[in-house]
Amino acid sequence: GGREITVPATTLDMWWQQAGKPHISVIKMDTEGAELFILQGGREFLSEIKPILYLEIEPTNLVIYPYTAKDIIQFLTTVGYRVSTLGGTHVTEENIDELTKCFDTYKASPLSL
């Protein structure tokens, strides 16, 4: 009963450039594990605009991807973000595995805030 369809895709950077580089202050991401791929495709956008990010990091969703929650935290750190739980606990590569046992949504704030 299914049929194959083709869906156009782009990166966050390409979308942002084509949209005229609008200022965006907050992004909520819930992409069922694809967060790192999307963040990597938005490196320029994140570096220039520095929006606050709310993102889901759920280990069970990451199983099919070639990266872990630690890789997401590492990437965000390298582009100038500090990650925390919604309650304010600082998230690092060292504590993310433990935190994902209790939390699935995190806030990433630019260090310049």
Image: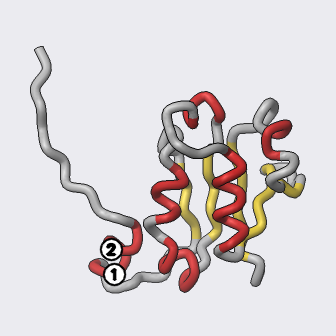
As drawn, is 9 to the left or to the right of 41? Answer: left
Quadrant of residue 51 within the rendered picture = bottom right
The CA distance from mark 2 to mark 1 is 5 Å
Contact check, label 2 and label 1, Cβ < 8 Å: yes
| On-image quarter of the C terminus | bottom right
Give the labeled residue for mark 2: 14
Q: Secondary structure at mark 2?
A: helix
Amino acid marked by disc 1: Gln
Q: Residue at x 65, y 74 (%)?
A: 79
Q: Looking at this rendering, what residue extends furthest in the top direction? A: 1
Q: Nearer the viewer, residue 26 or 78?
A: 78
Q: How many marks?
A: 2
Q: Residue at x 41, y 82 (%)?
A: 22
Q: Residue at x 54, y 62 (%)?
A: 27
Residue 37 is labelled as none
Q: Looking at this rendering, what residue extends furthest in the front direction? A: 66
How many residues crowd around disc 1 within 10 Å: few (fewer than 14), some, or many (20 or more)? few
Q: Secondary structure at mark 1?
A: helix
How many residues crowd around disc 2 within 10 Å: few (fewer than 14), some, or many (20 or more)? some
**Looking at the image, is 72 positioned above or below residue 10?**
above
Amino acid marked by disc 2: Met
Q: Nearer the viewer, residue 63 or 91?
A: 63
Give the labeled residue for mark 1: 17
As drawn, is 44 to the left or to the right of 51? Answer: left
- Give coordinates of residue 52: x percent, y percent: 64, 68
- Give coordinates of residue 111: x percent, y percent: 77, 78
- Give coordinates of residue 11: x percent, y percent: 36, 65
As drawn, is 30 to the left or to the right of 109? Answer: left
